[in-house]
């Protein structure tokens, strides 16, 4: 069967998922991202999924949404925040799913924080989430920024995950050991590590993760920014 979905890694936690029906950009931190494989001014998309408000995820979401007319899909308060900046938005809540023209998106639990910088320090904007994306008979799990959590076992038992995108960078999210345990719980066919090596504080050699994750019978794809996997 020929591949219907292409998933391109644009660096850090940014991916461009292309299905026959839509281009879905996830966590578009491109401007100021030393690993970025695309320019915010040039990327084309129909939807932008944003896991949380931190600048290394929310990034260029509003400017890309305004230029392309893409809809930002995010947790309620973050969607309203983006809407107030002039973007077209679709607010959702953790655990909630919705059918879009390209497929279904469900928000999943992420253990992390979500904030923007205000004049007197950080202000929380919505709770962070991950995304379960179902399109063309395939299931993609984008974990966002999160700790290892037993909730992943529930995702692994209730969904047949074709591709899992997991943070491994440590310090702000799970590190390689916990991410390998997440692979055991999620049982994806393919896993791609993300959210590492962008900055010194999340410098991690992905080979240790790749070795441990492979022990759980999963194909590990360590992607360079710009590379694609096909589903
Ligand atoms: Ni974060
Ligand atoms: Mn982050």
Image (tube, grey):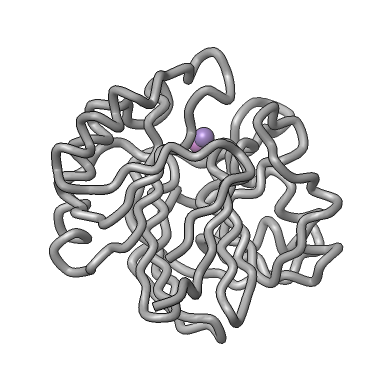
Q: 120 or 184, which lies in front?
A: 184
Say which quadrant the N terminus sits in: bottom left
| 163 is higher (above) or lower (below) than 176 | below
| 137 is higher (above) or lower (below) than 47 | below
On the image, the x and y values in percent for residue 213 come to 23, 37
**To which quarter of the image does residue 12 belong?**
top right
Q: Residue at x 55, y 36 (%)?
A: 224
Q: Residue at x 53, y 42 (%)?
A: 13
* Residue 72 visible in rendering: yes
Q: Residue at x 40, y 48 (%)?
A: 165
On the image, the x and y values in percent for residue 22 come to 62, 76
**To which quarter of the image does residue 180 belong?**
top left
Residue extending furthest toward the front: 1
Say which quadrant the C terminus sits in: bottom left
Q: Is residue 107 left or right of residue 23?
A: left
On the image, the x and y values in percent for residue 77 come to 56, 58
Image label count: 0
Q: Is residue 83 left or right of residue 74?
A: right
On the image, the x and y values in percent for residue 203 come to 48, 17
**To which quarter of the image does residue 42 belong?**
bottom right
| 62 is higher (above) or lower (below) than 71 | above
């Amino acid at each position: 069967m020929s591949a219907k979905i292409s998933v391109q890694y644009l660096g850090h936690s940014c991916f461009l998922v292309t299905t026959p029906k839509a281009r879905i950009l996830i966590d578009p931190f491109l401007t100021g991202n030393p690993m970025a494989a695309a320019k915010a001014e040039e990327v084309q998309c129909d939807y932008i999924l944003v896991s949380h408000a931190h600048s290394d995820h929310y990034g260029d979401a509003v400017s890309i949404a305004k230029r392309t007319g893409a809809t930002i899909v995010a947790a309620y308060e973050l969607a309203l925040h983006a809407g107030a900046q002039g973007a077209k938005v679709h607010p959702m809540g953790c655990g909630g799913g919705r059918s879009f023209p390209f497929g279904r998106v469900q928000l999943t639990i992420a253990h992390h924080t979500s904030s923007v910088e205000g004049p007197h320090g950080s202000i929380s904007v919505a709770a962070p989430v991950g995304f379960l994306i179902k399109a063309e008979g395939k299931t993609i799990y984008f974990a966002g920024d999160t700790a290892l959590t037993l909730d992943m076992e529930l995702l692994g038992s209730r969904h047949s995950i074709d591709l899992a995108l997991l943070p491994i960078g440590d310090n702000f999210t799970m590190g390689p050991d916990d991410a390998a345990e997440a692979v055991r719980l999620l049982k994806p066919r393919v896993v791609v590590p993300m959210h590492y090596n962008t900055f010194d504080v999340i410098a991690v050699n992905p080979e240790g993760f790749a070795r441990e994750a492979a022990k759980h019978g999963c194909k590990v794809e360590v992607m360079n920014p710009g590379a694609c996997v096909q589903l």
